[in-house]
Amino acid sequence: MSGSNYRRSLGTVSLTAVGLGSIIGSGWLFGAAKASHLAGPAAIFAWVIGAVVALTIALTYSELGSMFPKAGGMVRYGQYSHGSLAGYLAAWANWIAIVSVIPGEATASVTYMSSWKWSWAKGLYNGTELTGSGVALASVLLLVYFALNWWAITLFAKTNTAITVFKIVVPTLTAATLMLSHFDTHNLSRAGGFAPHGWNAVFNAVAVSGIVWAYNGFQSPLNMAAEARNPKKSLPRAVISSILIALVIYVALQIAFLMAVPAHDLAGGGWSALNFKSPLADLAIAWGINWLAILLYADAFISPSGTGMIYAATTSRMIHGVQENGHLPGVFGKVDPKTGVPRPALLLNLVVAFAFLAVFRGWGSLAEIVSVATVISYITGPVAVMSLRRLAPDMPRPVQLKSMPVIAPIAMVFGSLVLYWAKWPLTGKVILLMAAGLPIWAFYELRKPMSQLKPHLKAGVWMVAYLFVMAFVSYVGNKDYGGQGYLPEGWDLLIVALIGLAFYFWGVRSAWHNPSLEAVREELKAAQEDAERVSASV
């Protein structure tokens, strides 16, 4: 197998660091400000809602990850349950969501650097997006992320764990210091009250303010499952722990930000008029906490860089998974035997990251693309986990929740709602981006005889239909979500929830015993037999 050169060197602590390091990246530097801009003080609830959504979906993927401890796990599950079409669409959405995070983290670092006092730094960002010099510096950061992954997974693990400790300490210290320095509870009622733009704005903040982007890091341990020493225990622990720890940190930061905003800044147009270039650092300077501002400027390089480094690692494993699914040339499945690193896949992702950086130069625009693509990739988890319970009830499931038949449809509903909350036309644009990947699938699949292709098409049509239906509902939906207003408020959310449930049941019933499932079943069985022989000989 091409993945046999991976080294199982990551324990629970390292995998939790991978998950937490992915979650705490640039989101904590900009997320509180952007969420406040959209929802005011009610943004606190946006982080809680986002965590509930992520945790519900993560539970479905934890069972899948423990069943299939393979590199790039998130891009494989749909292939195992539904064959090539649904599997490819899920993998494409997931890969787009993750690979675009890498230039986003570099963009975040450079944006914060633009607040430095030197003239060359101020020219990196024009207030909306990176300038030419800013893009050049962000490109250098991309090269650093990939260079650290090029040499060895053990170097990655040691470096990332150290960086993650720093990334936890600094946000926690920032929240505590801002709260102690200025905690104006009157901000909760100023500028339109607690929810100045209504609760629809809170839901929109969940989808596009970087909250989904932030919590999406839970999947990083799953994508590195092939390198986990004891995936049965370490994977679910790492996924769930990283989400819960991040929730506490993010809510604390959001509260600290809300209470630290000077009253005169809100008097000029409310929360939506705030325009901080480096939000938390700007507040630290406003209250004379210069040492914190300096620390934040330093961490604005370290935190996003740590996340960018993690995603450079996990996306290369995802490309490996896509190749093994049969939708990329064989070279991208090669793993360097000396370092245990899939170097060709790493290079491909570097090229794509440069392309995203050239097109989307602002953190906000990248956050929106990442968030919607992430939600689209989420929908296959709930469907796949219950499909595989039906198709392969005999397969070992180290993580198996009795409540999964309830959790899975709820997760599908949550994912559908977040997709709708993202607003038209953003939903339509990202769904079109998903369709743009289909020619690659067609290149590899349409050459096959129709007798072989037909069951894949039949099993995957539910996902294609889901994307078109969700785009249509977004277009005709409530005006608060960018639609034409044909669906009244409240009823639109009910309709989206019912659509999510309908496609969930359709998707589960569409699953079939496809060749990928049989192949991985035999592969895992052989691996288990090998492990038993080795154990018996010791």
Image (cartoon, rainbow, N blue to C red):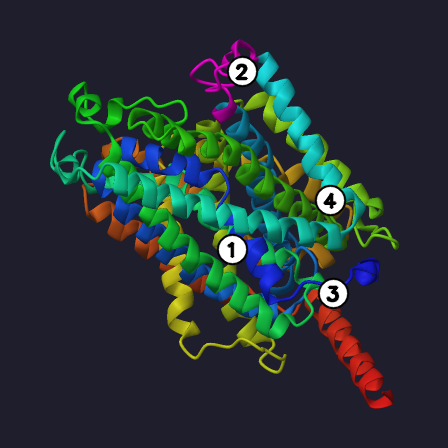
520 or 207, which lies in front? 207
Disc 3 marks a residue whose amino acid type is Arg
Residue 18 in percent (x, y) is at 59, 54
The x, y position of residue 451, in whole percent, is: 72, 58
Q: What kind of element bears circle 4?
A: helix
Q: Which mark is residue 94?
A: none
Q: Position of residue 467 (x, y in %)?
A: 46, 44
Q: Is residue 196 left or right of residue 314?
A: left
Q: What span is colored magenta in the figure?
A: 112-131
Label 4 is placed on what type of residue? Asn
Residue type indicated by callout 2: Ala
Instruction: Say which residue label 2 marks.
Output: 121
Q: Residue at x 55, y 50 (%)?
A: 164
Is the Cβ of the residue at disc 1 closer than 8 Å to that at disc 4? no
Whichever of callouts 1 and 4 sits on the residue coming sooner in the sequence is 4
Q: Nearer the viewer, mark 1 or mark 4?
A: 4
Mark closer to the observer (1, 2):
2
For residue 149, which numbered disc appears in the image? 4
Vertical side of 477 occupied by 293: above or below:
above
| Left or right side of 224 for 165 | left
Look at mark 3 in the image and give the residue it sits on: 8
In this orientation, which residue lies closer to the viewer: 73 or 35? 35
Badge 2 or badge 3: first in the primary sequence: 3
Q: Locate residue 150 relative to residue 395 in the image: left or right.
A: right
Q: Which residue is mark 1?
A: 218
What's the distance in space between the residues labelled 4 and 3, CA to CA? 16 Å
Q: Alpha-carbon distance for marks 1 and 4?
A: 20 Å
Query: Which comes sooner in the sequence, label 1 or label 2?
Result: 2
Q: Mark 2 and mark 4: span between their CA atoms?
A: 28 Å
Residue density around tag 1, few if under 14, some if 14–19, many if 20 or more, within 10 Å: many
Q: Amino acid at mark 1?
A: Phe
- The answer to which of marks 3 and 1 sits earlier in the sequence is 3
